[in-house]
RNA sequence: GGAGAGAUGGCAGAGUGGUCGAAUGCGGUGGUCUUGAAAACCAUUGUACUGCGAGGUACCGGGGGUUCGAAUCCCUCUCUCUCCGCCA
């Protein structure tokens, strides 16, 4: 969420810039400012009464000590009204604060100045294309046919064990998963990311910290007996490492990565174009997360984009990088680059990574700050994350693009990990 | 799952109703001394809100209560540790 200070000091600019996100902030901003001013004045009234109360109490203590019991009792009688008054004001203050919290989370993050105008994914700006779209020799099958043909991923079996969207990877299919995970982690390590293996269920506080709760509660599987949530992305546990922390300035940037399974309920979003591996309830992903100095977060973002590009390149997949437009960028992001790979048999681009800078929007909610030696107060950090990479669509593209009459060729970089070079 | 003990500042650890935002030690920062370092000595050292400022207010695991006054008493929740049980 945005800081109240920023909203107070930049209200015109805020309203103007949120228009790029197709968000009309004017009324909410007005309401927030009014509530915040109200909060401040009520707070200072409470403080003042409280100060009165404190000094009165001190006085009473002194009087008792000096044995002046009747004077003490007299002073005591004065406190009743004050006490009632404070209670009343505190109730008001609570109401105002609650209302303010509700309003302030309604405002999305401010888009970066480079975010293009636009209403939908069709208006995203392609900043780069790479790799080569090769002709497929022979029969051109979509991956959902290929996995059946070679018996490497079994959807029906997953349905039997769990339900739709929980595939079972078998034989070379399973090993390909493991190979990709290890390859991604090794590449991440080379790029300076520290590997963590976090819990894949999280508590409510963590859900709030990264913004899945309270709004997007429906996206997560919820273990109600213990009130824990299955993570939709490793971003949740890995970013929450730094919830309520003040980190040292010289430690920045903190670069972490994690492999985790991810769970998404994706309620009601199933249709014809989400066949096969295109959308699942459970999938594997390696996520990279950075906690960066505010002045260096865009440098960090560039580094993350370069890292993802490097991996996609090594896999030999045709790709393009999109700068998301105001209408497509997420609520919490300031700037997002999507990576898409071309899937030859489906003849469409598949999103495989999304790399974002949240600036201090997420950090404000997390209360993650940094402090340097000559800083008087800690300041909010910037947070960034990106997939590097999500497996299912990478697998889909690899299977489809590398199919030959003999079988599916495994990219050279993966062979040391898979220990086979063809699926046939 | 059963029984017991506990949660205080960056860490360790005192504090059982008033002058406690909290002793003391360690650590951190600045300084004196030194060619430099160590040692010693001196000073300083939490966060948030609010105010131009002096200052004020809140915070001793979370929430609630008793009281003129709570780190301290009561209720409740969470977590940690020890022992027992179960277990990859």
Image (cartoon, coloured by chain):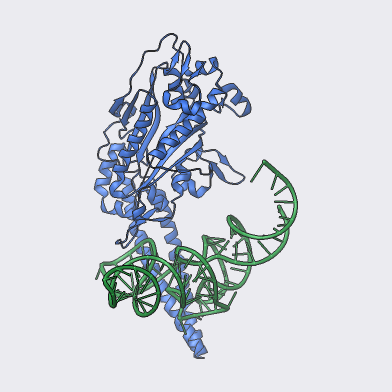
Asked whether A20 or A225 is in front, the reply is A225
Please identify the quarter of the rendering in which residue A128 is found: top left
Q: Residue at x 50, y 34 (%)?
A: A264
Q: Is residue B73 left or right of residue A54?
A: right
Q: Is residue B57 left or right of residue A260?
A: left
Asked whether A370 or A404 is in front, the reply is A404
Q: Residue at x 51, y 44 (%)?
A: A198
Chain ID, blue in image: A
Please identify the quarter of the rendering in which residue A314 is found: top left
Q: Position of residue A328 (x, y in %)?
A: 34, 33
Please identify the quarter of the rendering in which residue A210 is found: top left
Residue B17 in the image: above or below residue A348: below
Q: Position of residue A323 (x, y in %)?
A: 30, 32
**Residue furthest toward the top?**
A138
Q: Residue at x 49, y 81 (%)?
A: A76
Residue A212 visible within the image:
no
Chain ID, green in image: B
Residue A136 visible within the image:
yes
């Amino acid at each position: 969420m945005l800081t109240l200070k920023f909203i107070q000091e930049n209200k015109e600019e805020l309203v103007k810039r949120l228009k790029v996100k197709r968000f009309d902030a004017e009324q909410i901003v007005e309401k927030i400012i009014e509530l915040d001013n109200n909060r401040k004045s009520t707070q200072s009234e409470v403080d003042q009464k409280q100060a009165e109360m404190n000094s009165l109490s001190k006085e009473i203590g002194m009087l008792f000590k000096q044995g002046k019991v009747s004077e003490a009792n007299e002073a005591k009688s004065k406190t009743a009204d004050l006490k009632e008054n404070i209670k009343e004001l505190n109730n008001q203050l609570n109401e105002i604060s609650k209302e303010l919290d509700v309003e302030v989370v309604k405002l999305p993050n401010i888009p970066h100045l480079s975010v293009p105008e636009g209403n939908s994914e069709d208006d995203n700006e392609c900043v780069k294309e790479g790799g080569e779209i090769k002709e497929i020799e022979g029969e051109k099958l979509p991956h959902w046919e290929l996995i059946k043909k070679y018996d490497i991923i079994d959807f029906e079996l997953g349905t039997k064990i769990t339900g739709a969207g929980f595939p079972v990877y078998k034989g070379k299919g399973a090993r390909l998963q493991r190979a990709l995970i290890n390859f991604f982690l090794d590449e991440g390590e080379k790029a300076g990311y520290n590997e963590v293996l976090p819990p894949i269920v999280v508590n409510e506080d963590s859900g709030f910290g990264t913004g899945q709760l309270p709004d997007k509660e429906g996206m997560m599987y919820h273990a109600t007996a213990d009130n824990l949530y299955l993570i939709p992305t490793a971003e949740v546990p890995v970013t929450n490492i730094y919830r309520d922390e003040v980190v040292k300035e010289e430690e920045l940037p903190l670069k972490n990565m994690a492999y985790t399974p991810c769970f998404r309920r994706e309620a009601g979003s199933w249709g014809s174009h989400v066949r096969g591996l295109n959308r699942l309830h459970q999938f594997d992903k390696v996520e990279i997360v950075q906690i960066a100095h505010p002045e260096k977060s865009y440098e960090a973002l560039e580094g993350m984009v370069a890292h993802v590009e490097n991996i996609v390149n090594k896999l030999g997949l045709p790709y393009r990088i999109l700068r998301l437009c105001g209408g497509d960028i997420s609520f919490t992001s300031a700037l997002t680059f999507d990576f898409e790979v071309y899937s030859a048999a489906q003849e469409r681009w598949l999103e495989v990574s999304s790399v974002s800078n949240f600036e201090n929007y997420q950090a404000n909610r997390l209360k993650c700050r940094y402090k340097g030696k000559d800083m008087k107060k800690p300041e909010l950090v910037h947070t960034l994350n990106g997939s590097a990479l999500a497996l299912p669509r990478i697998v889909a593209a690899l299977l489809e693009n590398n199919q030959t009459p003999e079988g599916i060729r495994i990219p050279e970089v993966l062979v040391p990990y898979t220990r086979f070079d063809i699926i046939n």
